[in-house]
Amino acid sequence: MSSGYTGAIFDVDGVLVDSPHEEAWRESLRELMEGPWSDIVSQTSYTPEKFTPALYHERMSGKPRKAGATAALEYFGVPDIDRRVQEYGEYKQEMIIRLISEGRFSAYDDAVQFVVDVKKSGIPIAAASSSKNAKLFLERVDLSRFGAEGNLHGYFDVDVSGRDFAQGKPNPEIFLTAAKELGVDPSDAFVAEDAVNGIQAARAGGFGALGVSRADDVDALAAEGADVVVTDMGTVDVAALGRHELVTTS
């Protein structure tokens, strides 16, 4: 093991950007249930108010599109799931591209500044999101007010987001691939994640795990073995990363 971390891997949705994924999943299902699927609503447990933030974060967040769609439709007991999963996923994708193009998302300033500070400290960085939309988000984040140039996507040394991995999180394949492309051993890299299944994946791969709580889930992330959980990434001690420590400054 080296003296300090030599790689940093970042999830995108929920860590770097407050993405409209939850809104897109929720609203696209509502539109389907009110329109093309209205004939099956009575066979399900679905009502619009039952699509809660907790449902999204516990069952869908961080998963590839097909797995996310499947999780929601199974939860509501939607019949003929195999046929409907693709339709739901495609409907959601059209909606999210529309929301991104309308600028209906924002970057987390604390996270963007942390990414810049980590790279400036000499640690190579990778983006690793299950989402095929990650690049669209990252390209729209201007780094000029964070003491760097260009956009956030161009700032990363490696981006493995949106690839068709054989297994999604909590399998660590996406993070292991990012580490390999960074040229670092998993034990010398840490992963920043906001989802429980992302922390599980980081631990399974032998990485350090930085939990980022954006949804009042500090305890849940800590329970999965995150080395440290923060609500503000500005509190992470960047200097300590050089000592192979994930700690806060406070």
Image (spheres, rainbow, N blue to C red):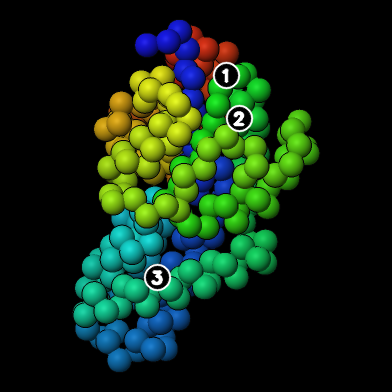
Q: Quadrant of the C terminus?
A: top right
Q: Is residue 172 visible?
A: yes
At horizontal 43% and vertical 73% (from top left) the residue drawn is 90
**Above or below for 22 versus 94:** above
The image quarter containing residue 1 is: top left
> Going from the N terminus, do you reach mark 2 or mark 1 first?
2
Residue depicted at 28% across the width and 66% down the height: 70
| Residue type marked 3 | Gly
- Which of the 4 quarters of the picture holds residue 38? bottom left
Instruction: Please give the residue where the numbered disc 2 appears in the rendered image.
Output: 114
**Viewer-nearest of labels 3 and 1?**
3
**Within-10-Å neighbours for mark 3: few <14, some 14–19, many 20+:** many
Residue in front for this viewpoint, 83 or 195 = 83
Return the x and y of residue 15 as percentages of the image width and height: 51, 42
Label 1: which residue? 238
Which residue occupies 41% across, 86% down? Answer: 34
Under mark 2, the amino acid is Phe
| Image quadrant where residue 211 sits | top left
Of 63 and 42, nearer the camera is 63
Q: Is residue 11 left or right of residue 136?
A: left
Q: Which residue is mark 3?
A: 89
Cα separation between marks 3 and 1: 38 Å
